[in-house]
């Protein structure tokens, strides 16, 4: 067993050392056999748990979840350190240098007059350091692994930044209605492949509308899912109160319960 005396307070170097010991011979068999691929979903889960803590305004939980997220970063860094590629120090060094370079108004002699100036400078510096010479280059830098609605919004914004956009929201709404009509036609023709594509176009167009009305599509969909869950919970409760078997109930019965639950929520 590794001898690691308990301390009243640990620091980042302790975390790095603990992870190194967990991965070393005589450490933890589970930790030792992990790869980037095997734990990549853990990184995603921990990120969303941080978001959950923020949404709940739970500072104690936020502190804990940030630690879990940091552990994932140290975990991945340790794997690369074992291969002689890079370690946690290089990760920290890289992000510090990036922050300094991308904040010339703080660490240099550039003057900014607004938050927009800051963001524009950030984007311009990012393009130069990443070797992005075209808008397409910057679009390809948006990870395909992002949540689909978020990725769509980022791609659309990059196009909009050079004027490739509707002049106002009605153009985006008209496009959304056009895509819905095309999906209806694909379904009527029993064309599953075209329906697949048209459904994607509808979602992409809906994100376009969200940009114009300054609504985050991801958050809007989450709120809609929450509303559905809340209303369905009430429907199920009403059905139970009236001894209605939902599995065998008619669509008219279920619609009536849904409308009742909706009316109760809207009071």
Image (cartoon, rainbow, N blue to C red):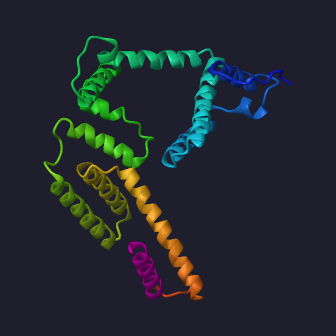
As for residue 34 lying within the magenta part, the answer is no
> Looking at the image, which is closer to me, 265 or 227?
265
Instruction: State the residue lying farthest toward the right.
Output: 1
Residue 245 visible in this rendered orientation of the protein: no
From the viewer's perspective, tell me whether residue 12 is left or right of residue 257. right
The picture places residue 98, in percent across and down from the top left corner, at 41, 18
Instruction: State the residue lying farthest toward the top.
Output: 109
From the viewer's perspective, tell me whether residue 36 is left or right of residue 175. right
Placement of 188 over or under 144, stated as above or below: below
- Region of the chain picked out in magenta, as a range: 252-267
> Looking at the image, which is closer to me, 121 or 179?
121
Q: Name the residue: 16% across, 57% down.
A: 170
The quarter of the image holding the C terminus is bottom left
Placement of 85 over or under 138, stated as above or below: above
The quarter of the image holding the N terminus is top right
Placement of 188 over or under 245, stated as above or below: above
Instruction: State the residue lying farthest toward the left.
Output: 167
How many numbered markers are drawn? Answer: 0
The picture places residue 240, in percent across and down from the top left corner, at 59, 83
Q: Name the residue: 29% across, 69% down.
A: 184
Quadrant in which residue 32 is drawn: top right
The picture places residue 186, in percent across and down from the top left corner, at 30, 67
Quadrant in which residue 176 is drawn: bottom left
Q: Name the residue: 37% across, 43% down.
A: 151
Q: Name the residue: 18% across, 35% down.
A: 162
Placement of 154 over or under 113, stated as above or below: below
Residue 162 visible in this rendered orientation of the protein: yes
Assign the magenta stretch its main secondary structure: helix
The picture places residue 193, in percent across and down from the top left corner, at 37, 60
């Amino acid at each position: 067993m590794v001898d690691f005396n308990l301390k009243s307070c640990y620091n980042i170097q302790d975390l790095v050392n603990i992870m190194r010991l967990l991965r070393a011979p005589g450490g933890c068999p589970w930790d030792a056999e992990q790869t980037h691929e095997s734990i990549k979903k853990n990184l995603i889960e921990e990120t969303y748990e941080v978001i959950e803590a923020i949404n709940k305004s739970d500072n104690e939980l936020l502190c804990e979840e940030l630690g879990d997220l940091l552990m994932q970063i140290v975990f991945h860094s340790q794997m690369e350190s074992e291969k002689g590629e890079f370690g946690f120090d290089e990760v920290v060094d890289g992000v510090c240098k990036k922050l300094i370079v991308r904040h010339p108004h703080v660490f240099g002699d550039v003057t900014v007059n607004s938050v927009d100036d800051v963001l524009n400078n950030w984007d311009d510096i990012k393009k130069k350091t990443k070797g992005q010479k075209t808008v397409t280059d910057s679009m390809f830098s948006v990870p395909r692994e992002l949540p689909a609605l978020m990725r769509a919004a980022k791609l659309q914004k990059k196009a909009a930044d050079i004027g490739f956009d509707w002049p106002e929201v009605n153009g985006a709404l008209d496009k959304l209605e056009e895509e819905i009509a095309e999906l209806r036609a694909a379904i009527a023709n029993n064309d599953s492949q075209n329906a697949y594509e048209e459904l994607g176009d509808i979602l992409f167009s809906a994100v376009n509308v969200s940009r114009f009305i300054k609504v985050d599509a991801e958050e809007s969909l989450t709120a809609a899912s929450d509303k559905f869950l809340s209303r369905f919970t009430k429907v199920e409760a009403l059905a139970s109160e009236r001894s209605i078997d939902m599995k065998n109930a008619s669509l008219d019965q279920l619609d009536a319960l849904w409308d009742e639950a909706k009316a109760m929520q809207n009071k």
